[in-house]
Image (spheres, helix red, strand yellow):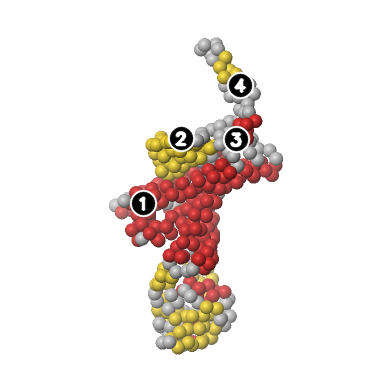
């Protein structure tokens, strides 16, 4: 079942991504020749109107093949611009046979290549944008269904620290800092850090009574998510790790879901930067085996966990596709923005070399991900 869950998660996210390209292509009257979930040999296909819909063998990607493309988009086949010298000689028969021809005006109307750069940019960008939008809607829905939240109840007061000296006790519940309400434990660290060491007014509830305390936070050096040392401020309290399920109404869910989406997008970009800086080790890169394992674990934990996992994966897919690497959407966007700014397309030879380099980088990344997965889940357990 673990593999089935992974196929479901990837299938939905790939469909959402390709649907973005497909709908924008249709909106701008570009002829879509193929819409494929997966790549490689086709398992099933059906022609509906001018588009062939395919289910292909390898479920780690997909593509939308548009009429009049040049180069590769989403794994589609190559389409070069036709030339006027359309007749060539067949060497065996000596007869004149029909070769490439100039597109008619009607065909140019439906050709991706002949659309203005802004239109091509919109079509290519739609895939990653749809992935980000899927995650955004998923986070909003999760907030409405209820999300696990750590309460502001204190589980431990560290001796000789500011909170202990002020009279804070275990099992106190922090309700406000400097007049601003505190609803969960994450709020506390943010508000104390924002004080920059200035005296704060702490509101707590103790045995049904409200109490006020004035505390001066002290400097503290800790490690962030990436293991880097960061300076901040603390008062010396630890969470009681009391977890409740908190549900939000539509308006609050919209706000919370939007904030969470931007938070994960920012974290994804930051992680990529930290990886390039070698702060995050390359062995943290995961591949298909990790996705399969995590999909199974999150599905076993419940539908909400599985949806949250899909949202995180969707943001990663969207962000990675926006990187300016040839063969990815971001690489195509780079070429089209170049054309938009300099009023001429990038030289075809340059594009071909860039595609080859991009493909090698992508294959190298995939090899690294597979290697890490094998070490992590097989060799490491041996």
Q: Which residue is rendered at x = 40% and y = 61% of the image? A: 304
Image-quadrant location for residue 349 = top right
Image coordinates of residue 244 in percent, x first then y, are 40, 72
Image coordinates of residue 176 in percent, x first then y, are 51, 80
Image coordinates of residue 134 in percent, x first then y, are 49, 54
Q: Secondary structure at mark 3?
A: loop
Residue sitting farthest toward the left: 382
Q: CA distance from mark 1 to mark 2?
A: 28 Å
Residue 71 in sight from this viewpoint: no
Q: Earlier in the sequence, mark 3 or mark 4?
A: 4
Q: Which residue is rendered at x = 31% and y = 51% of the image? A: 1
Q: CA distance from mark 3 to mark 4?
A: 19 Å
Dot 4 corresponds to which residue?
Answer: 86
Given this view, does label 2 or label 4 mark the residue nearer the observer? 2
Q: CA distance from mark 2 to mark 4?
A: 29 Å
For label 3, the crowd category at 10 Å Cα-Cα, with few meaning under 14, some 14 to 19 and many 20 or more, is: many
Dot 2 corresponds to which residue?
Answer: 47
The disc label shown at residue 178, or none: none
For label 1, the crowd category at 10 Å Cα-Cα, with few meaning under 14, some 14 to 19 and many 20 or more, is: many
Q: Secondary structure at mark 1?
A: helix
Q: CA distance from mark 1 to mark 3?
A: 38 Å
Q: Is residue 315 left or right of residue 114?
A: left
Dot 3 corresponds to which residue?
Answer: 111
Q: Which residue is rendered at x = 45% and y = 63% of the image? A: 142
Dot 1 corresponds to which residue?
Answer: 5
């Amino acid at each position: 079942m673990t593999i089935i869950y992974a196929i479901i998660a990837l299938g939905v996210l790939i469909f959402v991504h390709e649907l973005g390209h497909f709908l924008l292509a249709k909106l701008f009257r570009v002829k879509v020749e193929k819409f494929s979930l997966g790549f490689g040999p086709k398992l099933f296909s059906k022609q509906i109107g001018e588009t062939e819909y395919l289910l292909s063998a390898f479920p780690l990607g997909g593509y939308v093949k548009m009429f009049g493309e040049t180069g590769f988009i989403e794994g589609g086949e190559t389409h070069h611009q036709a030339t006027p010298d359309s007749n060539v000689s067949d060497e065996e028969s000596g007869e004149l046979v029909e070769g490439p021809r100039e597109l008619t005006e009607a065909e140019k109307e439906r050709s991706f290549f002949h659309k203005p750069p802004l239109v091509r940019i919109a079509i290519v960008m739609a895939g990653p944008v749809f992935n980000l939008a899927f995650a955004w809607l998923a986070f909003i829905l999760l907030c409405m269904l209820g999300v696990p939240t750590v309460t502001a109840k204190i589980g431990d007061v560290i001796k000789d620290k500011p909170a202990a000296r002020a009279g804070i006790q275990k099992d106190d519940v922090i309700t406000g800092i400097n007049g601003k309400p505190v609803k969960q434990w994450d709020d506390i660290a943010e508000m104390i850090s924002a004080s920059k060491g200035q005296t704060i007014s702490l509101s707590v509830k103790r045995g049904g009574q409200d109490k006020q305390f004035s505390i001066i936070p002290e400097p503290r050096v800790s490690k962030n998510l990436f293991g880097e040392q960061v300076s901040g401020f603390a008062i010396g309290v630890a969470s009681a790790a009391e977890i409740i399920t908190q549900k939000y109404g539509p308006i609050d869910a919209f706000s919370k879901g939007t904030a969470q989406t931007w938070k994960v997008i920012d974290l994804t970009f930051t992680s990529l930067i930290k990886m390039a800086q070698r702060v995050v080790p390359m062995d943290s890169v995961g591949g298909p085996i990790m996705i399969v394992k995590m999909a199974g674990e999150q599905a076993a934990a419940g539908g909400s966990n599985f949806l949250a996992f899909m949202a995180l994966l969707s943001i990663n897919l969207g962000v990675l596709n926006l990187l300016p690497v040839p063969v990815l959407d971001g690489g195509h966007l780079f070429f089209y923005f170049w054309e938009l700014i300099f009023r001429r397309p990038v030289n075809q030879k340059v594009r071909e070399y860039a595609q080859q380099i991009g493909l090698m980088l992508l294959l190298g990344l995939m090899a690294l991900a597979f290697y890490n997965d094998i070490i992590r889940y097989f060799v490491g357990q041996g």
